[in-house]
Amino acid sequence: MSDIGSPPAYPLDFYARPAEVVAPSLLGATLRVVGRDGVVRSGRIVETEAYVGPHDLACHAAKGRTRRTEVMFGRAGHAYVYLVYGLHELFNVVTGADGEAQAVLVRALEPAPGTRGLGDAGRGDGPGRLTRLLDIDRRLLGAPLDRPPLTLHPGRPPPRVVATPRVGVDYAGREWADAPLRFVDPDSAQLSLSLARLGPGGYSSRGVRDPSRTPAT
DNA sequence: TATAGGATTTAC
DNA sequence: TAAATCCTATAG
């Protein structure tokens, strides 16, 4: 099998940096999966979130080291996949030094031409949608990202990157709920939430509190 | 053992 | 606006 047309996968030490550094650097990268049916599916990442460790109250590692979060406390560059709401598999990459328990959640990607899911899954604009599209589930928990069936490859970085608060973590308290740890390519049409353009170079995300306004209590 | 709630998506 | 659906964490 030839891999001509795509650069080699990132080495595992690429991920051994802080999550808030790795997360924006993954925008534009290509995530590739060999599905259970042997079909190769891939897409260009356009939205990520950083979960920076046990002190981050939105991070699963804040609950301590459990069987579910065990892989987060391990080596960078491995997959942390878990089930939310009893329905959706969410895909993360472990980052940072050993034991720091950080991860980057991949929230949206643009499907590569020809990439389609097993059923009718054809969209990549959401953390649950993209895993269904690429056939990612917990069978890949702990899998390294530098070899099949799961690989991440350098791609064309977006011209701009916008940071916003993370989605769905209001329970974590204001400090962590408001921290700008979500990174998006604002020029992509495949984001999990739409961005409203404010002006040249200025963006605000729907659902994101405007700092110039008084926060609702 | 029982119960509540979640890094979401979809349908009514 | 609520259901779908199951795993984890916490309480008893």
Image (cartoon, coloured by chain):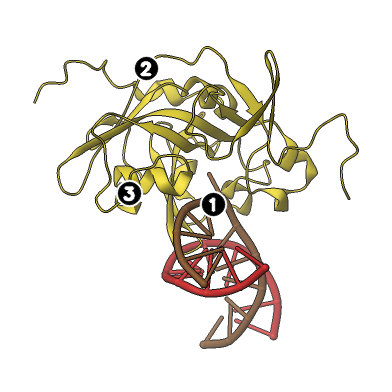
Chain colours: A yellow, B brown, C red
Chain at numbered mark 1: A
Q: Which amino acid type is shown beneath numbered disc 1?
A: Arg
Residue topped by disc 1: A65
Residue topped by disc 3: A121
Callout 3 secondary element:
loop
Pinpoint residue B6: horizontal percent, then vertical percent: 60, 57
| Gap between marks 2 and 3 measured at Cα | 24 Å
Return the disc, 2 or 1, that comes first in the chain's sequence: 1
Residue topped by disc 2: A155
Pinpoint residue A97: horizontal percent, then vertical percent: 51, 29
Chain at numbered mark 2: A
Pinpoint residue A32: horizontal percent, then vertical percent: 29, 32
Q: Nearer the viewer, residue A36 or A67?
A: A36
Q: Which amino acid type is shown beneath numbered disc 2?
A: Gly
Labels 3 and 1 share a subunit: yes
Q: Nearer the viewer, residue A111 or A35?
A: A111
Return the disc, 2 or 3, that comes first in the chain's sequence: 3
Of circles 2 and 3, the one toward us is 3
